[in-house]
């Protein structure tokens, strides 16, 4: 009997419809605490933070009360829990199921209304490495898929592809357009004019109608005789209130034309795309004294950038100077801010969100999430 891949598991063709239906629906009945608030609608004008965590939850935190407002039970398996919020703030899109499926979850009801498998044909296993986003009008969803054919005696790695989905495609959404994509592509964001900015070997500007890709900001191709090549590790696509697409990098500044790494000055910098205007910027902001996973410019002051991993830090960009640092209870991966820029929210790793004053970096609160850790999950702050 012919087999087909559904949600990372094999289903017989005769039972494929039942398997898909079972995988596409929340299983809140297994968790009464989750089921109790799934039908709780969000309030217009309220500010929320959403983030996924184990065993497979999507949590919505009310930032006014600093409490969990509701929790949606997600289908299939957890991981990585990368989220994007739709422009109308009604649908959460979640990359999950071990990097293999993107879901659209109606936040008012917790109902799954969209489902796109990254694997497209029989015996193919495709993953998206946090590389998806939604168009500014909410009508399309974009994802880079990395396929591998699973044969009886060997695997064959395929070419990455940039897939375009109609967000009204329902629970069996299929790509409406597919284009070649660069290898090592990860996070992306949508500009206000509909252009997609895709991070990979460089930050590419993508025409979603034709698939044409041009370099918006060089990473691998940034040739500076005064500096070593950039090193980038960034898989957290945060949708910021000021509409910045920011990625941190490390480099080394040479003392002279000898380019001696032993005497070089190691630096942190950022790559930034203003998604409202399309303007780009790349510059160093401070010495490399510790590692950060994510960073964010302040919505209140463009000269301030924060960094996060083992500590929460604040830099003066113009002076390339560390201004403040706060010790943390444990490591956090993802840095978020409210719309006003007065609060910082530290997410990722365990199941607690640490809340800090954006000016002083002092800890001012904490939210405990139901369930386990957030791991690599990327949260988002939004106003309904």
Image (cartoon, helix red, strand yellow):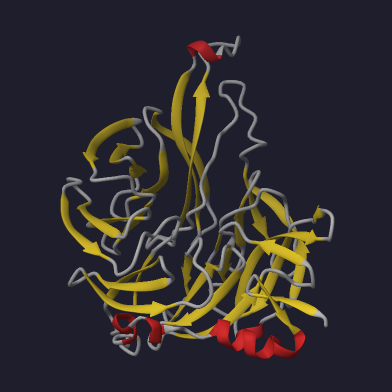
Quadrant location of the C terminus? Answer: bottom left
- The foreground one among 340 and 188 is 188
Which residue corresponds to the image point at 47% horizontal and 81% vertical from the top-left?
A: 105
Q: Position of residue 8 (x, y in %)?
A: 64, 70
Which residue corresponds to the image point at 79% horizontal and 72% vertical from the top-left?
A: 121
Q: Position of residue 50 (x, y in %)?
A: 36, 69
Q: Position of residue 285 (x, y in %)?
A: 40, 34
Please say if 334 is above or below 105.
above
- The foreground one among 199 and 204 is 199
Which residue corresponds to the image point at 54% horizontal and 40% vertical from the top-left?
A: 232
Please say if 76 is above or below 359.
below
Instruction: Residue 291: name its quadrant.
Output: top left
Please say if 294 is above or below 168.
above
Which residue corresponds to the image point at 39% horizontal and 60% vertical from the top-left?
A: 374
Q: Give the side of residue 15 with respect to residue 203, left or right.
A: right
Q: Position of residue 175 (x, y in %)?
A: 72, 76
Q: Give the side of residue 49 with respect to residue 65, left or right.
A: right
Q: Give the side of residue 335 with respect to residue 21, left or right.
A: left
- The foreground one among 297 and 100 is 100
Residue 103, visible in the rendered structure = yes
Quadrant location of the N terminus? Answer: bottom right
Residue 384, visible in the rendered structure = no
Please say if 354 is above or below 305.
below
Query: Tag count in the figure?
Result: 0
């Amino acid at each position: 009997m012919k087999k087909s891949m559904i949600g990372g598991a094999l289903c017989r063709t005769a039972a494929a419809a039942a398997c898909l239906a079972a995988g596409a629906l929340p299983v809140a009945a297994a968790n009464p605490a989750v089921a109790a608030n799934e039908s709780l609608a969000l309030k217009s004008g309220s500010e929320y933070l959403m983030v996924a965590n184990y065993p497979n939850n999507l949590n919505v935190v009310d930032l006014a009360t600093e409490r969990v407002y509701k929790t949606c039970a997600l289908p299939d398996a957890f991981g990585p829990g990368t989220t994007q919020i739709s422009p109308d703030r009604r649908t959460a899109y979640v990359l999950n199921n071990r990097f293999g499926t993107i879901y659209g979850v109606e936040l008012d009801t917790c109902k799954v209304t969209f489902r796109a498998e990254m694997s497209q044909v029989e015996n193919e296993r495709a993953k998206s490495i946090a590389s998806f986003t939604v168009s500014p009008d909410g009508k399309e969803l974009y994802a880079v898929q990395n396929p591998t054919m699973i044969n009886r005696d060997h695997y064959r790695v395929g070419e990455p592809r940039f897939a375009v989905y109609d967000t009204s495609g329902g629970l069996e959404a299929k790509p409406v357009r597919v284009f070649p994509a660069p290898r090592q592509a990860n996070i992306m964001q949508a500009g206000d004019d509909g252009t997609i900015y895709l991070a990979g070997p460089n930050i590419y500007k993508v025409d979603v109608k034709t698939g044409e890709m041009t370099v918006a900001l060089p990473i691998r191709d940034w040739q500076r005789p005064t500096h070593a090549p950039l090193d980038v590790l960034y898989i957290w696509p945060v949708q910021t209130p000021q509409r910045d697409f920011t990625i941190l990098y490390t480099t080394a500044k040479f003392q002279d034309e000898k380019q001696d790494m032993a005497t070089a000055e190691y630096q942190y910098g950022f790559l930034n795309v203003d998604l409202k205007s399309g303007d780009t910027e790349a510059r160093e902001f401070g010495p490399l004294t510790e590692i950060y996973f994510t960073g964010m410019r302040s919505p209140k002051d463009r000269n301030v950038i924060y960094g996060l991993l083992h500590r929460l830090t604040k830099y003066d960009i113009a002076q390339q100077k560390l201004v403040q640092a706060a010790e943390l209870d444990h490591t956090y991966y993802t840095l978020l801010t409210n719309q006003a820029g007065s609060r910082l929210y530290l997410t990722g790793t365990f199941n607690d969100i640490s809340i800090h004053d954006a000016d002083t970096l002092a800890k001012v609160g904490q939210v405990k999430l139901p369930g386990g850790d957030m791991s690599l999950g990327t949260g988002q702050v939004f106003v309904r």
